[in-house]
Amino acid sequence: MNYNFRKATLSEIAPIWAILQQAIQRRKEDGSAQWQDGYPNPAVVQKDIEQGAGFVLVAGKTIIGYSAVLINDEPAYGNMEGKWLTNDDFVVMHRVAISENYLGKGLAKLMIKNIENFALSNNIFSVKADTNFDNLPMMKIFESQGYTYCGEVYFRGSPRKAYEKVLTK
């Protein structure tokens, strides 16, 4: 299959939101508290796209994954309990989700690899991310992709595990 990772458009909010709703349901079925409070929602996706931070993974013409990808833009990361590996420019990924129909094919890892390539293309050598303490699948993906656990950050009053990967040219 030929996959493409690109910026999302406003006309794609509906399929992106459908993928996020599937991920929200998966988190619930796994007993996770992550994404069970009305976040993310279509307004968040719209804001991502309007800011140029919404990205999709597509197979042919079908949107199969979504992530927000931002540069140096995560205020919560300034108040971490722990220590980042670097203090330079960084790319941060949020709202990583793969369509229910494409799970188990390594596509979250592929999307993360594309995010790392996006960072490198912007001459940035650090990718940071976080996930809920009870999102074991995402923690396993981060660890399998060479991300280092650095400490805790807080979003909407809840602690989250923070990870960083230092990239090489």
Image: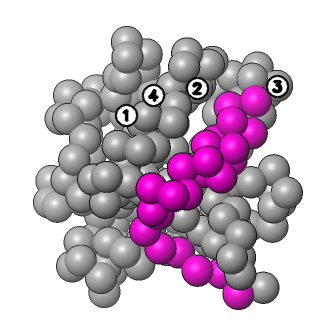
Q: Position of residue 72 (x, y in %)?
A: 19, 53
For marks 2 and 1, the one nearer the N-term is: 2
Q: Amino acid at mark 4?
A: Arg
User: Mark 4: few, some, or many residues within 10 Å (few <14, many ≥20)?
Assistant: many
Q: Which residues are magenta?
A: 2-25
Secondary structure beneath dot 3 equals helix
Q: Nearer the viewer, mark 3 or mark 4?
A: 3
For marks 3 and 2, the one nearer the N-term is: 3
Q: Position of residue 41 (x, y in %)?
A: 52, 31
3D distance between C-alphas at marks 1 and 4: 8 Å
Q: Nearer the viewer, mark 3 or mark 1?
A: 3
For marks 3 and 1, the one nearer the N-term is: 3
Q: Nearer the viewer, mark 2 or mark 1?
A: 2
Which SS type dominates the magenta stretch? helix
For marks 1 and 4, the one nearer the N-term is: 1
Q: Amino acid at mark 3?
A: Glu
Residue 154 horizontal side relative to residue 14, left or right:
left
Q: Is residue 11 above or below residue 48?
A: below
Q: Residue 48 or 12: which is nearer the viewer? A: 12
Identify the mark at residue 160; answer none if there is no mark: 4
Residue under pointer 1: 151
Q: Residue furthest left?
A: 88
Residue under pointer 3: 29
Residue under pointer 2: 35
Q: Nearer the viewer, mark 1 or mark 4?
A: 4
Secondary structure beneath dot 2 equals loop
Q: Is residue 1 above or below residue 31?
A: below
Indicate the quadrant where residue 126 lies: bottom left
